[in-house]
Amino acid sequence: ILINERKMGYFTTASVVLGIVASSSTSINAFTLTSSSRSATFSRPTISVTHPLSLSTTTDTESPPEPPTFYPLYGPRDPPTDRTIPPSILSTPKHTGIDSLPCPAYTPHDTDLTGYLSAREDCWNLSCKDYPAVIAAPTCTQDVQAVVRAAQGERVAVLSGGHSPMCMPTGAFLISLRNMNTAELDRENMTVTAGGGAKIGEVDAVLQPFNLAAPYGTHPDTGIGGLTLGGGIGWLTPRVGLAIDNLVSAEVVLADGSVVTVDDTNHQDIYWAIRGGGGNFGVVTKFTYKVYEVGGAEGFEPGMLLGGIVPFDPVEFHIPTVIEKYATDCLATSSDDVQMLLLPNGGPAISVFTHHGTKTEAQTALDNLGKGYGTTMPPKDGVTPITWTEGVQTLTALGDPNGEGDLLAPGNPFYYTAGFVETVTPELSVFLAKAQKDAASAKGIHPGGAIVIMPLNGPFNDVPPGDTAISARNARFWVVFLLRLDGDEVEREEGIKWGRGLKKKFMTMDGVVTDMRLNEAGSMVDEGKQGMLPSQNEGCVEKMRGVKTKYDPSNLFCY
């Protein structure tokens, strides 16, 4: 039984990463955590949300809010024109016993492959889009229970947003939760409850009319399931902590098919484990989060805040210095000033700037951005008042989520890894700047990739290490290497090899937080898997093993 590498929330950008979570595997003998749940269906509408006006908390005296924004991102993706299934897949026997399931279930042996191939399109990373033996598409918790019971003795994987490296494994019995993508706002208690297959944009569509936001992710296409189960880093992390720090409760279908609600008083062991330990403790069918008001500070219209991009041209700025100064300023600024630093392959360093304070405070912070970074100041005309959903949440996609402007749109091959950083040292700054520069000419690497640095300081550091399954609470930054691959299969392998070299070097540098056992046979580094560096200390790992053994002793959820 393996323990997955880690599934820490990160993000997608038009030249960066996906607010997601990713898992792989580190051999430690205990369990595997699956990142998520997203259900693939082809009958589902473009977007399925509970409109805020339908909620009991909306009163007759309130003005009807504007309808939520609907993105074209979330409907079923068309199957490929080439419907060829590899002979090695077809040589395995077709699964039996799935015809009695209460929900659609597809196999590569189906006469009509539309359902199966469309479901495969829910996998974001082409490099990880393999051929499950079964793809079941439940629409409710009861469906999930039936599927789990029918899958006893199988190797079960779960898909939410489709960004995990293990969301579409060959031979797996895959539970795709994408049909379970509704979201419902409770304005009185300031919470939102979303299905395990919902994406950030689908939840934002419910929150947008009320100028509210949930604390996870940075890209609307990211699934909330894997993102949350791995921790959930996002734009609000420096203000209110991770998604798991704001997870009020969850509904979980266990390996025996039973369903439980977990929170700080019920099934506390599972509640602890799913907050950062990944998804292999059960299938999370509902998440309930705290929500927060965004925008509308003094000087701004309701729902508006200052945001945009500030580029640092490598001709005019020394990029290692920019990285160092950015890190120093992040730790010294107020929680209203939230920036991430993008290092697109071969390009400038880009501050993605947001500010939640008053217009005066925000403008002052913007004016100060770049002071001491070089002999000149960067251009700032790309920063204006913007909304949360249509502005801030689309910044990492350069305003075009999943469109032509989003270089990390679904269906492309990627190699990625990420990890926590306690201190951005001068040596680490030089390493990151060199990696950014070298990526532009590395064989098998597409120009669309990037390195991203996100701040964690603040509430993230205030959570005691033992309170959740993320014990690396001393980290101040989250660094993601997201490399889009290019060329033929041989060239892509060269790109992966180059990326693995970056990962090995990164994890040995001072300031990087990892408990990786470098000399263990079968470790993540030995296997070169994609995914996150471990974020748990040994005591945390042992506690997760105990929860896994208690609730899934046969390792049904094993990816």
Image (spheres, rainbow, N blue to C red):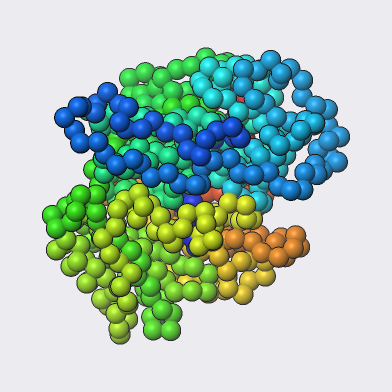
The residue nearer to you, when weighing 506 against 350, is 350
Q: Residue at x 54, y 25 (%)?
A: 139
Image x and y of residue 38, in percent: 54, 35
Q: Position of residue 525 (x, y in %)?
A: 62, 52
Q: Relative to 423, is 284 above or below?
A: above
Total number of numbered discs in the rendering? 0
* The one of 122 and 498 positioned closer to us in this rendering: 122
- Residue 526 lies, in percent from the top left, at 66, 51
* Residue in view at x 74 percent, y 31 percent: 107
Residue 190 is at least partly visible in this image: yes
Q: Is residue 340 left or right of residue 368?
A: right
* Residue visible at 22% across and 72% down in the picture: 367
Please say if 483 is above or below 381.
Answer: above
Examine the rendered structure and indicate whether residue 437 appears above or below residue 151.
Answer: below
User: Position of 16 compared to 27: left or right?
Assistant: left
The answer to whether residue 138 is above or below residue 420 is above
Q: Quadrant of residue 351?
A: bottom left
Q: Quadrant of the N terminus?
A: top right
For image coordinates 32% across by 27% down, the residue present is 54
In the rendered image, residue 32, in percent from the top left (x then y), is placed at: 58, 34
Name the one closer to the observer, 245 or 386: 386
Residue 424 seen in this snapshot? no
Looking at the rendering, in which quadrant would you find the C terminus?
Answer: top right
